[in-house]
Image (cartoon, rainbow, N blue to C red):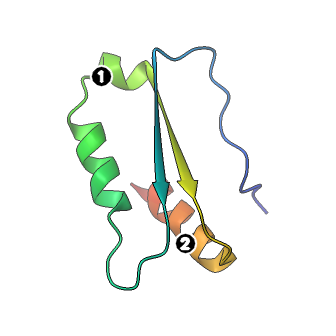
Amino acid sequence: HRDLHSFPTRRSSDLVVGIPTVKRPTQSYLIPTLQHLMSSMLPKEKNETLVIVLIAETDIAFVQSTINSITKQ
């Protein structure tokens, strides 16, 4: 079982981007937002950027599903 509150440790980042998300009744904007963010970065920028996603939900199934979607992308 994976700890939902853990993330890989990094030595340093020049830029930290925080993206909050919640469960929406119709459509999630998280994956398209992350895809757009990552596709617009140069490889060097990706290596120097830490992206933190806050999943502000109590529905653990939704949280796990969102983590799985992010991981697959």
Q: Residue 45 falls in which quadrant of the image? A: top left
Secondary structure of the residue carrying tag 1 is: helix
User: Residue, x 27% and y 58% (percent of image)?
Assistant: 32
User: Residue, x 63% and y 15% (percent of image)?
Assistant: 11
- Report which residue position mark 1 lands on: 43
Q: Residue 48 falls in which quadrant of the image? A: top left
Q: Position of residue 29 (x, y in %)?
A: 32, 64
User: Residue, x 63% and y 79% (percent of image)?
Assistant: 61
- Tell me if label 1 and label 2 are in contact, CB under 8 Å: no
Image quadrant in which the N terminus is located: bottom right
Question: In front: 25, or 72?
Answer: 25
Decide: few, some or many residues near mark 2? Use Cα within 10 Å; few <14, some 14-19, many ≥20: few
What amino acid does circle 1 point to? Answer: Pro
**Of callouts 1 and 2, which one flags the residue occurring earlier in the amino acid sequence?**
1
Q: Which mark is residue 60?
A: none
Question: In front: 11, or 16?
Answer: 16
Compute the Cα span from label 1 to label 2: 27 Å
Q: Is residue 33 left or right of residue 16?
A: left
Q: Position of residue 13 (x, y in %)?
A: 51, 17
Q: Residue 30 falls in which quadrant of the image? A: bottom left
Q: Is residue 73 left or right of residue 20?
A: left
Considering only vertical position in the picture, is 31 above or below 50?
below
What amino acid does circle 2 point to? Answer: Ser
- Report which residue position mark 2 lands on: 65
